[in-house]
Amino acid sequence: MVDDDTTFQLRMERYGPQLLSGLQGAYGERAEALFERLTGAMRDAFDSRPADLRVLDEARLLSPDWLQQPEQIGYVCYADRFAGTLAGVAEHIDHLKSLGVTYLHLMPLLQPRPGDSDGGYAVADYRQVDQRLGTMDDLVALAATLRRERISLVVDLVLNHVAREHEWAARARAGEQKYRDYFMIFPDRTIPDAYERTLPEVFPDFAPGSFSWDDELQGWVWTTFNTFQWDLNWANPDVFAEFVDIVCFLANNGVEVLRLDAIAFIWKAMGTDCQNEPEVHELTQALRAVLRIVAPACSVKAEAIVGPQDLVAYLGQGKHFGKVSDLAYHNSLMVQLWGALASRHTRLFEVALSNFPAKPASTTWGPYARCHDDIGWAISDSDARGAYLEGHTHRAFLSEFYAGLYPGSFARGLVFQHNPATNDRRISGSLASLAGLEAALEAGDQAQLSNAIARINLLHTAILGFGGVPLLYMGDEIGLLNDHGYRDDPEHAADNRWVHRPAMDPAAVALANADPSTPGGRILAGLRHTIGVRKRLPHLHASIESRVLPSPDSRVLLLTRDHPEGLLVEAYNFSEDAVELPSYVLRSRLGDTAVEQISGYDYSLLPETLLIRPYQPLWLTAG
Ligand code: GLC
């Protein structure tokens, strides 16, 4: 029998050095004192970890690749919009189970500020649940219920900023120096102006600039996002210590994955864009090490919506290899999926993926087609040049296409945060509306409808086939359209991201389940089927990377997954054309026959070409 002292000591031996080195990277000589202080806090949290979660810790230590398994299916929803309350979510587990969900990200659910809270991303209290959704006891109960159903609860950890109403901010305003030091506050514009020379604007439209004047503070406070979201000063070790307590508290209440919201922004350095600074990775390494010591069942996921050249660092490059986030959103994949659909061309996709540095084999992508945020065209100029495109013009084309302004566009999106200085136009809109379902239904055109459904299926199949935890976004499984109702809500009217955050429609779910010939039914049936196929394909283990196989036809993307148990070659037709794909590329990899896993059919690769239907995905293994 291993006693607690031994377990804690073993974990400290294993992860203490990672914690210390992360702290040293951020805090230099102040690191050792902080490390000592945290050791006591971690031991307390370790001692108070509930028995059932300790069992989970042991299980996860036996299966360190649990997030990489092909069975993993992620689902992302707002508790209130999905089921009213946290207790309500437990009553809708059947829907999640019917999709094979194993990972449930409930959008921000901790106590937000009153009024506009940026969808809950302005947290007023990390130890309380938003009272409209329930209580902390409800969260504990829901986590336990989900766990019994083999679904992991994922919760946001908003760590770049707190709400202006958070106790730390209130005490800073009341003049307590300790808490003023939790923020970055400047008496006049001198330093803010110096920083702003190199800072991009996140919300140029409704929250221009990165600093806000506050009368009570008598100062300018750093606010990257909205004026009510005060950036924390992570250069202050006390802030780190606070988050150690918060992280342990959430993990001990049953949270299994913490989504590190806006992690790219937490470290500021003059003369830079204050994103992706090296200290971000030091701090992530330190936070993850804390979790490995106290609650190894709990993993972290980076929400770093950054350019392709910066993304892999969140899964660990250089000395952080394998030591930072376990999971990260694959923002670049999402952008390329939409880009290829609009242009019916996959060269840029090939270039961008080929230029991507390898991720550590122990880490996992979170591939997604849609989420609650806008789509920003994170395409690098050099990748664009590699595909004989001009970056700026191509990004402008994609904005116009998805805003529905480009001639012949099937999309019905909205421009989010037009920045006249850079001409950046991000895009809001639901997956179905962006993929053409809204326009097709309005036109009452069956061919358009079939194409739209096929596009949705293509996107879902591509994220299921990429390897990682595919993240399905609530409502997309039945093709929910844009919802313009947000305009009538004063708290949401200025932020058109709410157009793609509709409430789940129980009648639409029932109809989709009952009638597989309706658009929702067709989408749902296709998705469920492909999820079932994915779950039994070992090739989709996330330790393996999807690699580009240069395609002989620019409309078709070819990916290969070289798993020791066999090869999987995926083909995705991003056009509404039936494509005669020269089969030699596939034949040279797979031999004369292949099994197409989605349909279950055998394909002969002997004929010179292989016919791929409009928007058809193929998952081929050697026959
Ligand atoms: C993340 C969230 C986004 C929010 C921002 C600020 O990017 O996904 O919705 O506005 O962080 O917290």
Image (cartoon, rainbow, N blue to C red):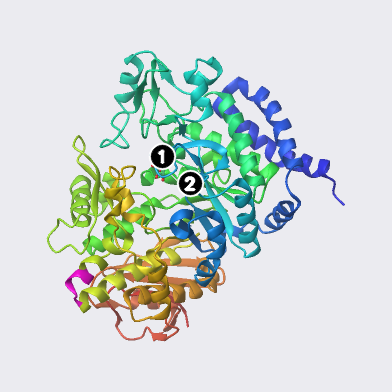
For disc 1, the marked residue is: 117
Q: Nearer the viewer, residue 260 or 250?
A: 250
Q: Is residue 501 magenta?
A: no
Q: Is residue 499 left or right of residue 101?
A: left
Q: Nearer the viewer, residue 472 or 179?
A: 179
Q: Give, as a three-letter code, the residue at label 1.
A: Ser
Image label count = 2
Secondary structure beneath label 2: loop
**Can residue 207 be seen from the camera position used here?**
yes
Q: Give the image location of residue 241, x and y in percent.
A: 61, 29
Q: Nearer the viewer, residue 21 or 161?
A: 161
| Vertical placement of residue 431 versus 131, above or below | below
Q: Is residue 167 left or right of residue 395?
A: right
Q: Give, as a three-letter code, the residue at label 2.
A: Pro
Along the polypeptide, which appears first: circle 2 or circle 1? 2
Q: Give the image location of residue 531, x and y in percent.
A: 48, 71
Q: Give the image location of residue 262, x and y in percent.
A: 44, 40
Residue visible at 39% across and 15% down?
218
Question: Start and end of the magenta stretch?
Answer: 440-445
For disc 2, the marked residue is: 108
| Vertical placement of residue 200 versus 89, above or below | above
Principal secondary structure, stretch drawn in magenta:
helix
**Can residue 377 be seen from the camera position used here?**
no
* Structural crowding at the residue carrying mark 1, measured as other residues with C-alpha within 10 Å and reported as few (<14), some (14–19) or many (≥20): many
